[in-house]
Image (cartoon, rainbow, N blue to C red):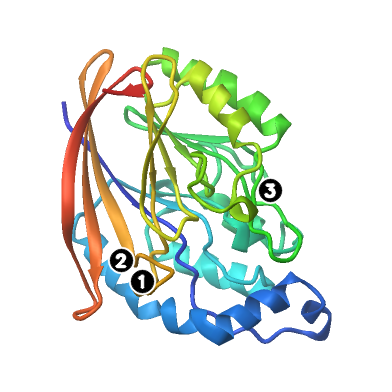
Amino acid sequence: MTAITLAHFSDPHLSHEPRLRLRERFSKRQLSAWSWQRARREIQTGGVLQALLADLRQYHPDHIAITGDITNFSLHEEFAAAADWLKTLGEPEAVSIVPGNHDALVKVDAADGLGRWQPWMSADRDRSPAPQWPYVRIRSDIALIGLNSARPTWPALASGIIGADQLARLEPILSELGARGLFRIVLLHHPLADGAVSARKALRDRAALREVLARAGAELVLHGHARDARFDTIAGPIAPILCLGLPSSSAIPNPKDEGARWHHLSIRRLDAGLWEMYVEARLLNPQSNRFERGGAYSMRVERGAAL
């Protein structure tokens, strides 16, 4: 059967020079602005992200998935600029996103914040004015399930939470999609594996989410948030479920960041309960500011678990 191709990248942290209003200085935004001005503006550059997108477009993927941290400071003007940037990637039906902790530094009304991104994180045929979680998008034999782990937290924390309501809705969704024989890809920002990030940055209810996945199953989990690429597994109903994580797609390699990369995935059904997945890693060469092949692998996936 014909393969479906997916491009995954994460944490673009679109360049934006913060000019905080007085009331915004008395919030977590100020800490993030200091971090940006002190170090991150030299590490996360628009030029790297442009090079990544130029490389990605050569592959003509069927779909693009972005797993959070599109902004830096959760400013109203950032959400608006990010919506304009998302439009350059393709039609909303061809791009799926979920928010990250930087997209939820502080509470922002939907009209000025995540609601601006509704076309890229809504279920098929959903016209709700604000995002509804989880959302499901079906593209051929693939089901993309978007989760929101981004919540405002106290200063110095970058943790996330899915929450009981979202978890309760997720399990029957996964079960129904699995019964239809679809390749289920769960998208979220925070990693699911223990130890993937420090406690202050971790998904607080990851154990509860892993329990849902262990019962209902999924074929793949994609995330961001970590400073390095991740290849982890969690328990599934048949065998372990693969979790692939990526570092910032705009970061130059440095002592804290592995450096920008993106994944090109090709997924092909072999028979009613068996899939073949091919993953090519594209890595930044900081000397040329171009992306190069960093390795590739293929694996077979059967009904909710990798073989």
The mark lying in front, picked from 3 and 2, is 2
Amino acid under label 1? Leu
Amino acid under label 3? Pro
Amino acid under label 2? Leu
- The residue indicated by pointer 2 is 53
Who is closer to the viewer here, 182 or 220? 220
Question: Left of 121 or right of it: where is 229?
Answer: left
- The residue indicated by pointer 1 is 49
Q: Return the mark for residue 129.
A: 3
The mark lying in front, picked from 1 and 3, is 1
Name the quadrant containing residue 162: top right
**Which residue is rendered at x = 39% and y = 58% of the image?**
228
**Which residue is rendered at x = 36% and y = 19% of the image?**
239
Who is closer to the viewer here, 199 or 120? 199
Q: Position of residue 38 (x, y in %)?
A: 56, 86
Q: Secondary structure at mark 3?
A: loop
Who is closer to the viewer here, 83 or 127? 83
Q: Position of residue 137 (x, y in %)?
A: 46, 35
